[in-house]
Image: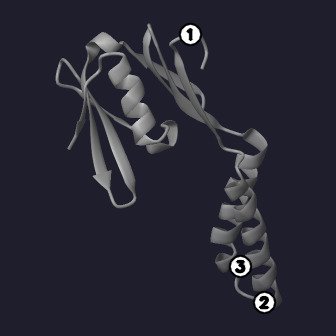
């Protein structure tokens, strides 16, 4: 939490999963090299290793801030702030693999929010309802 009453959530890109992906990709490259496979079979493995290495080095941070100014969506290098007064409601759609979140604005525009920016849905619901923003399950 930043100031009293403000909510802050961050997710780091430098996670154990990125390290595991890097090791697995490098292992797959080494295994493929022992079989003298054609060069094009290396491309997906090199791409996966490069992305995992980038996440470990750059550490892209994503998240949200909720305060008196509004709801700020932080996605790597960009920050978009939506005033709470302009949000009609937040729609939560449950799927088997997670929850989709959509901000429905008073002017009927809809803003889909990436799940990588958000805390678990119960925490998000509590923080939004505490500030008077209705949350609906679709």
Between label 3 and label 1, give the one nearer the viewer.
Answer: 1
Quadrant of image for the C terminus: top left
Whole-number angstrom distance, CA of label 3 to CA of label 1: 56 Å
Whole-number angstrom distance, CA of label 2 to CA of label 3: 9 Å
Residue 68's quadrant in the figure? top left
Pick the residue in front: 23 or 64: 64
Q: Position of residue 30 (x, y in %)?
A: 81, 79
> Where is 11 relative to 47, above or below?
above
Q: Residues within 10 Å of mark 3 (few under 14, many from 20)?
A: few
Q: Position of residue 1 (x, y in %)?
A: 60, 20
Residue 77's quadrant in the figure? top right
> Where is 18 relative to 1, above or below?
below
Under tag 2, what secondary structure?
A: loop
Q: Position of residue 137 (x, y in %)?
A: 23, 41
Residue designated by label 3: 39
Q: Position of residue 52 (x, y in %)?
A: 70, 55
Marking on residue 36: 2
Between label 2 and label 1, give the one nearer the viewer.
Answer: 1
Residue designated by label 1: 4
Marking on residue 26: none
Q: Can see residue 75?
A: no
Q: Residues within 10 Å of mark 1 (few under 14, many from 20)?
A: few
């Amino acid at each position: 939490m930043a100031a009293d009453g403000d909510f802050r959530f961050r997710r780091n890109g430098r996670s154990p999963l990125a390290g595991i992906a890097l090791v697995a990709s490098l292992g797959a490259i080494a295994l493929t090299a022992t079989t003298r496979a054609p060069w094009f079979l290396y491309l997906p493995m090199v791409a996966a290793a490069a992305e995992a290495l980038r996440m470990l080095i750059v550490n892209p941070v994503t998240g949200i801030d909720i305060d008196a100014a509004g709801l700020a969506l932080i996605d790597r290098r960009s920050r978009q702030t939506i005033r709470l007064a302009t949000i009609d409601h937040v729609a939560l759609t449950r799927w088997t693999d997670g929850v989709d979140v959509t901000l429905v604005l008073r002017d009927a525009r809809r803003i889909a929010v990436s799940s990588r920016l958000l805390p678990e849905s119960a925490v998000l619901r509590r923080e939004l309802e505490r500030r008077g923003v209705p949350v609906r399950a679709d």
